[in-house]
Structure formats: C-alpha cells, structure tokens
Amino acid sequence: MWKTVKLSFAALTVVLMIVLAGVVGYAINDGEGSSTGSGSSTTIDVSGDGFSILDEIMEILDQDFVVPDAVDYDILREGAIDGAIEALGDPHTEYITPEQYELGIDIISGAFEGIGAQVDQDAVTGEIFIVAPFSNTPAAEAGLVFGDVILAVDGESAEGWSVRDAVGVIRGPQGEPVTLTIRHFDGEIEDITIVRATIVIPTVFSETIEDENGDPVNDVAYIRLEQFTDQSVGDMSAKLKEIVDAGFDSLILDVRYNPGGGLDATVQIADMFIDEGIILTQVDRDGSETVFEAHAGGEATEIPIVLLVNEFSASGSEVLAAALRDHNRATLIGEQTFGKGSVNHVRPLSDGGALYVTIARWLTPSGELIEGIGIAPDITVTFTDADVEAVRDVQLFAAINFLHDELAQVLD
C-alpha cells in the first residue's frame, strides 16, 4: 500500500493532523493579517442576476426534483461553494465549514485537541491511513504507526470516507475516548481506544543514530523537525547550540513527513543555518515582491549538513530545503519533495466557517517556483519493500555514509 500513496494537498486532503481541517498548518503563513494584495481588483456583485440564479435553481429543485429528501439546502449550499472554489483551479484554496473550523488548531503556537496523528487517503484504494503519529501523543502511545488503515471509528465503517470525514469523526473534546478499528501492515485487525487530549505539538527531536551495521554514530548529530511553529524556533535554536558546543562534526536534519507551518517560524529556522542572502521571495497577486533575507550570526552556519527529504516534505520544508541548497549549506538526500509553492491565509466567514485562500506564491533564492514540481534531492534514495518490512532507514544510512565520506576527504 505504501508505494501507492499520493498526496493531493488539495487543502483538506493533505498530510493531515487530526484537527479541524489541517490546512491551517500546511501553507507557510504567519496566520495574522495577511492580505490579498494591494493591486487593482474587481468587485463582484453577488446580489446581481449572475448569483441570484442559484436561488432560482434551489426553488425549482425544491418544487420539482424527483427525490424531495435530497433537496437539502445546507448540502447544496456547500456544494455550490465547493464548485465555485474548484473553478479557480487552485488545489490549496478551500472552504472550511463552521463545524470544521470549530475544531481548530492554533498552528502558530502548535497546540490543538485530538489524538495527535497525521492521516491521508490512499490514492488507489481510497482507504484512510495513518501517515505518522506525533511523538509523545495519545496516538503514539497507543502504538499507531505509518500504514495503519482506519477501518472504522467507534463502530462506524470508514468505507467511502474522505480525509475530511475521518477528521470530523475522530476529533473531539479532550478527555473523551475514541475507538479506532485498525488494520495493521501485516493484516491484523485491532480495536484501539485512545483518549483525546490537548496536545502541544513537539516539533524538534534529537537522538543518537545508528549506522547500517547497528553501531552508534557519535560524530554526526541528528535532528528531526516535524513542523514549523513558534515552539519550533526556540527548540531548534537551543538544540543547535548544544550540537555546536558538543563539537559534532556534522548534522543530519530530517524534514521527511514535515508538512510545513508558519512563515515566520520557517524563515527564522532557515536563518539559523545561513549567514546572508535570500531565504525566499514572496510574490503577491499584484506582482509586488517581499524578500526575506538571512542575518549574520546564525546558530549553525558552519557545520556540514545533510537534509533528509521525501514526497511528504512540503511548503515550509521546501522553503528550508531550497534555501540550504541554493546557499550551498546542505546536501539533499531522499526523494522529490511535494511541490507546494504557495502562501495561504485563513479568512473567517460570517457563517462561522472560513476560507483558506492562496494569497501569494513564493520563489526559492535562485528564483525558482516549485509549485506542483517540488525539489529534487542531490542524491536520490528510495525504499524497497524489503527496507520497509525490515524497518531499515536506507535514507538515513546514506546520509551518514555521505557525511563520513566528506569528512574523510577533508582529512585527506
């Protein structure tokens, strides 16, 4: 199954935390006061004939449609909204219903209520599956892992569900249990009851790694960055200072499965590795550009770096990857990244919902637009079925070998 997984990133069908709609966190965005640009605009008169035709259609359907019970105003209204947004041709602009918005996540601080897992939908089977649990969350403690398929929630079959449907059922108040019927990678089916909690998302993790022979690697530091939040900035700064002070020869920075986060946090973290130059350029709807630049005195501007990336590395992860690549600060190892080069903002609506709207594009330091394309690694390393079954991280092993080879060349 894992080989068939393709992320759509069509706003709600992204690598998704089990929270409102997840989309708030997956564009790079400061979450406050973003505008749609200062250029000229056209005012659309929604009271004119063009939009009043919807009322006529609703009235005719209410009077004439062969299945009266199917004429549900709320459902048809949401369908009309979704249709209008779909006509834009932008997979990252999405309507969030009041029910979904109420389940919200403060992506800037990195806190939410839920079980603490990322889910997505298999492109072939349509099944909802676990991408990864966040560390030290109820989902992780319950033993959920990548590839676990959600068959039912509290006894209700998940067949035919979208990611949005799954999120709406799994989410709920802290302290309340939810039972997931899970099919594991080996085919075993199990009911797992998880108590929902308020979760401050941990985002920066460091641990001792082992090479392909199982021997500990003591000269290479390892940091896994799971998301870009305000908390990430301070945690990353502290961890990098520890690594530099400890005298590590090099660093592996892992942003696989990192869907992005806040713009400010992304820029600040990239700035820790670069002494000068452009981090990214934001291009607004009127063509105006905002350039984000690095400042001297970053925490880790000298240490050699390998950045681990994969197809689930998106948005802020791609900003970081492009900045480190273009400034020759890191070698990228892994797989092609997702390809989200847009800046998004959440605009609350009068019905209690919100519009998650694309307001700008961003360019890499070299001027590249990666929307729909992604970033190719310098060294491509993919997993075989045997690697997955043996839980063998060949991408990590490749990073260790690369850094050791680089160090050997320097010493020679």
Image (tube, rainbow, N blue to C red):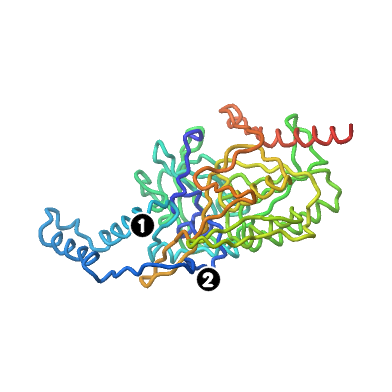
* Kind of residue at disc 1: Ile
* Kind of residue at disc 2: Gly
Where does residue 396 sit, x and y in percent of width and height?
69, 37
Left or right: 269, with 165 as reference point: right
**Front in this rendered view, residue 374 or 282:** 282
Q: Residues within 10 Å of mark 2 (few under 14, many from 20)?
A: few
In the picture of the structure, the residue carrying the numbered disc 2 is 33
- Residue at image position (55%, 54%) is 116
In the picture of the structure, the residue carrying the numbered disc 1 is 85
Above or below for 256 versus 287: above
Where does residue 219 sit, x and y in percent of width and height?
83, 41
Above or below for 151 versus 381: below
Furthest residue in direction top, as rendered: 386
Point out the tag, 2 or 1, that comes first from the N-terminus. Answer: 2
- Residue at image position (72%, 42%) is 306
- Residue at image position (89%, 35%) is 411
- Choose top left, top right, bottom left or bottom right for residue 46: bottom left
Left or right: 66, with 74 as reference point: left
